[in-house]
Amino acid sequence: MAERIWLTDGGLETTLIFHDGVELPHFASFPLLADAAGRSRLHAYFRRYLAQARRHGAGFVLDTVTWRSGAGWGGIIGLSPDEIDRVNRDAVVFARDLATSADAAPAGILVNGVVGPHGDAYAPDRFLTVAEAEEAHGRQVRTLAAAGVDLVTATTIASAAEGIGIARAALMADVPVVVSFTVETDGRLVTGQPLGEAIAETEAATGGWVAWYGVNCAHPDHFRPVLAGDWTERIGMVRANASRKSHAELDAATELDAGDPAELAGDYRALMALLPGLRVLGGCCGTDLSHVGAIGQRCVHAAA
């Protein structure tokens, strides 16, 4: 991973909803795997990002569309445990087929099994304990690992305990794991814990099993001021929002705030100077191909 920059996609769900007019139940994209039209839409979406990776000579971290196909949200949507397993397996097969297609990036692709938070990351009704999180996420992590992902990434995680539980589940499944926290506008997790403390706690509780950490679903302005200390060396991924709005404001928004792609790319370039281990660059809510393309142009060649 350290030899090159790896791009990812942008905000899949916000792109589908606001740009493509697709209705997603509970913000879940995996239902598109159920028919040929949906799979074609997903294929076209990721193919454009793979083209950006080829253009810039970057690797590509290809996500499975499983952010909301864990036990928690899968159950809310109405799926049985066996149906949830099947969704996760199908998502890996879809990603693996795309990774081996003619559209693949020449610098390499990693198939990334995405694990989302058990509840609402921005306004959880309660926080899981470590043991509860390991139990809640364990089956999905095991299913993704058995289906053949290269790594598992827990994204939009709001508490250290949930990140630790997912990391422990990955350890038991013998699959590399990334834990990506989301922060509020003050650079702290929704629990109030500083980002650096959450990473340090996760490190201590997992014996350093986490491959690297990430920050996602927050604008760089929200967390750049807190990036100081040795712990920052463990941040390997940033998937920021284009918008500077808070999570509460974004939840209430009826229109997409796409920000400025060039400005966001400049923010990423500044983050690379602060984060020596930063290698995986992509987007989150409100970002699309234009943002990732600008990030690739500004950051991949600068790193080389």
Image (cartoon, helix red, strand yellow):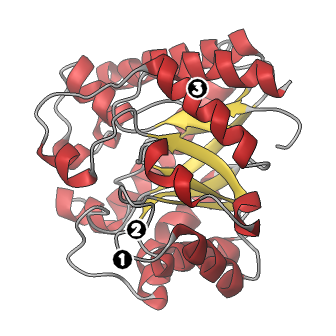
Q: Kindly identify the residue that appears in the image at 61 percent across and 72 percent down.
A: 199
Residue at disc 3, secondary structure: helix
Q: Nearer the viewer, mark 1 or mark 3?
A: 3
Give percent across and percent down for residue 120: 26, 63
Foreground mark, 3 or 2, reads 3
> 144 and 212: which one is in front?
212
Determine whether the residue tagged by mark 2 lies in a helix, strand or loop. Answer: loop
Q: Give residue 129's quadrant in the image.
A: bottom left
Left or right position of 191 against 272: left
Residue at the front extreme, as displayed: 225
Q: Read off the residue under disc 2.
A: 158
Dividing the image into 4 quarters, which one contains the N terminus? top right
* Residue denoted by label 3: 266
Pick the quarter of the image with the C terminus. Answer: top right
Q: Earlier in the sequence, mark 1 or mark 3?
A: 1
> Mark 3: few, some, or many residues within 10 Å (few <14, many ≥20)?
some
Label pair 2/1, CB-CB below 8 angstroms: yes
Residue 191 is marked as: 1
Local SS, label 1: loop
Task: Give the Cα separation between the discs numbered 1 and 3.
Answer: 30 Å
Cα separation, mark 3 vs mark 2, equals 26 Å
Q: Amino acid at mark 1?
A: Thr
User: On the image, which quarter does residue 122 sit in?
Assistant: bottom left
Which one is earlier in the sequence, the residue at label 2 or at label 1? 2
Q: Is residue 67 left or right of residue 27?
A: right
Instruction: Tell me if label 1 and label 3 are in contact, CB under 8 Å.
Output: no
Q: Nearer the viewer, residue 258 or 288?
A: 258
Q: Badge 2: how crowded within 10 Å, few (<14), some, or many (20+)?
A: many
